[in-house]
Image: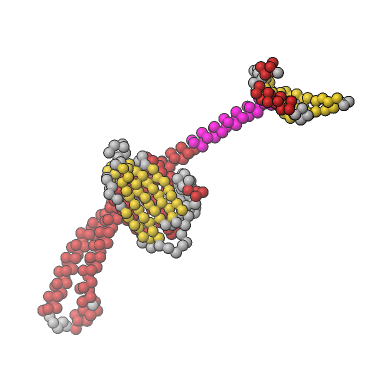
Amino acid sequence: MAQLRASVNNPEQITRQAGEFFSQPDAEIRDWLWTFNGSPPKVLSLSSTPTRMRDVPGRLWLLEDISERKLAELALQHSSAQLKEQTIKLEFALKELQHTQVQLIQTEKMSSLGQMVAGIAHEINNPVNFISANLQYANKSIQELLYLVQLYQQSYHHPNPSIKAWIEEIDLEFLAADLPHMICSMEMGAERIKQLVLSLRNFSRLDEAAVKQINLHEGIDNTLLLLNHRLIKGITVSKQYGDLPLLQCYPAQLNQVFMNILSNAIDALFEQTEQRDKRIVIQTERLTENQVSVRIQDNGSGIPAKIKDKIFDPFFTTKEVGKGTGLGLSICYKIIEKHGGKIVVNSDIGKGTEFVITLLVHLDGKG
């Protein structure tokens, strides 16, 4: 036994097997493996069954050299491990490729948006400025004409029948009272267009591709203004702003994060079937000297737990074909990551969803 133990590389196993054999001498033995030292090592498979010949007890032993089979199994295991390792590397490379693709799409989208907004702002601002300037002149002229009509009425108390008929036809009294209101509403409309163009420019921040210090609340407010046409359909927005310092960031990119998350919140509220008030709550808070948080909550239907961990993956979407690319939240994640921050989602089915964004006040980490 000592010589056998010295020639094998699994002596403990053989010792245990020998103990089992001597404690149960009539037991069958199946596929005991003995591995002998060498290059390559030899592997023997031992099987034995008790027998009797002419009333003399004995055992029938079968020894099989399975070295080649074991070597093949080891080679297969090694190949399988290598294949698994390569698969992991390929999956990682695929994710990196997808993230790179997302960044390229993001860069191209922002570039296209900048060019589009520049063109829109230029094309709209020129006629709006012309209208605004002429409205002021028109208002002054109308007031003068109305005053002239008033003087005529005071001087000629009995106009001829044709003038009297025309006064009744145009309802002069109503016209004189309504014209100033019409001009005022037109001026307000022109000013509204100016504000929308300004908000669009501020949202895209065409001239601010570099890092800037901005008022985070202005970025959120500009985004809400651009989404106002969707918010007026029975959605209440509650803004609970804290006292935040100016934030160092890439303004256009952060605005895109707010646009994506708020748009998703609006979609979730429109998709819910329960009859309840639709609500979005936006909270901001200074956490530390160099850290702030933005929380955007909705009381929509919520995100199922089984897909919550996937929502930031590139090209993952739960929306119908044609209604979503699956890139919005992935882009948000990369933008926040670029700013040294974090974005997490909390959601309960039937209660709603909350996105929590943590951002640095100073990108270099220095207060």
User: Which secondary structure dominates the residues rendered in magenta?
Assistant: helix
Which residue sits at x=23%, y=68%? 181
- Which quadrant, please, contains the C terminus? top left
Residue 278: give x, y in percent of width and height.
40, 60
Q: Position of residue 186 (x, y in %)?
A: 25, 64
Q: Magenta part of the protein: which range?
A: 68-93
Of the pair 165 and 219, the residue shown nearer to us: 219
Q: Relative to residue 367, is residue 19 drawn left or right?
A: right
User: In the shown orientation, is residue 155 left or right of residue 219?
Assistant: left
Q: Residue 82: x and y, percent? A: 57, 30
Question: In x, y percent, where is residue 81?
Answer: 58, 31
Report the side of 187 relative to 256 (left or right).
left
For the point 32% across and 45% down, which residue is it? 287
Query: Residue 277 versus residue 91: which sits nearer the camera?
Result: 277
Quarter of the N terminus within the rendering: top right
- Compared to 208, does 76 lie above or below? above
When the figure is inspected, residue 149 is found, relative to residue 355, above or below; the finding is: below
Identified at 12% across, 80% down, the residue is 156
The colour mode here is secondary structure
| Rendering quarter of residue 4 | top right
Q: Quadrant of residue 331?
A: top left
Residue at the extreme top of the image, as rendered: 3
Q: Is residue 75 magenta?
A: yes
Q: Is residue 173 above or below residue 194?
A: below
Residue farthest toward the right in the current orientation of the protein: 54
Front-most of residues 346 and 47: 47
Which quarter of the picture shows residue 6?
top right
Say if residue 303 shows up in the picture: yes
Q: Is residue 173 highlighted in magenta? A: no
